[in-house]
Image (cartoon, helix red, strand yellow):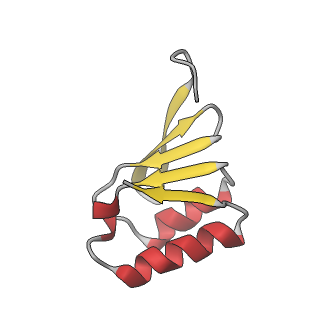
């Protein structure tokens, strides 16, 4: 739903690269090793939507479940993995 001219900013949060679309309306993390720290830092920015690579959880279901809860605790309702 974003225009092709939408501003994209590259950020570093907890040592990981995160892309901010339209001033944190959407945050995308394509890192292949996610940590609780980066998930928390993303959530603190309170974006409308967050997208992470499912592969970044490396099969750690506990971290993935915690990520959902961390997002909800910061008001982020739209958290997706691809």
In this rendering, the count of numbered labels is 0
**Residue 34 coordinates in the image, percent (x, y):** 37, 65
In the rendered image, which quarter is residue 25 located in?
A: top right
| Residue 24 appears in the figure | yes
Q: Quadrant of the N terminus?
A: top right
Taking 48 as reference, is 5 left or right? left
**Residue 75 coordinates in the image, percent (x, y):** 73, 63
Q: In front: 43, or 82? A: 82
Q: Quadrant of the C terminus?
A: bottom left
Query: In this rendering, is residue 80 above or below 74?
Result: above
Q: Residue furthest bottom?
A: 62
The residue sitting at 41% across, 70% down in the picture is 35
Query: In this rendering, is residue 10 above or below 57?
Result: above
Q: Residue furthest right?
A: 75
Q: In front: 82, or 30? A: 82
The residue sitting at 54% across, 39% down in the picture is 20
Q: Residue furthest front?
A: 1
Taking 7 as reference, is 81 left or right? left
The residue sitting at 58% across, 26% down in the picture is 2
| Residue 33 appears in the figure | no
Query: In this rendering, is residue 58 above or below 3?
Result: below
Q: Residue furthest top?
A: 5
**Residue 62 coordinates in the image, percent (x, y):** 41, 84
Taking 23 as reference, is 30 left or right? left
**Residue 61 coordinates in the image, percent (x, y):** 37, 81
């Amino acid at each position: 739903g974003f225009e092709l001219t939408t501003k994209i900013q590259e950020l570093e949060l907890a040592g990981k690269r995160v892309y901010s679309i339209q001033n944190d309306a959407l945050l995308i993390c394509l890192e292949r090793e996610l940590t609780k720290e980066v998930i928390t830092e993303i959530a603190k920015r309170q974006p409308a939507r967050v997208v992470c690579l499912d592969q970044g959880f490396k099969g750690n279901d506990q971290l993935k479940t915690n990520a959902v809860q961390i997002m909800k605790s910061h008001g982020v309702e739209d958290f997706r993995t691809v």
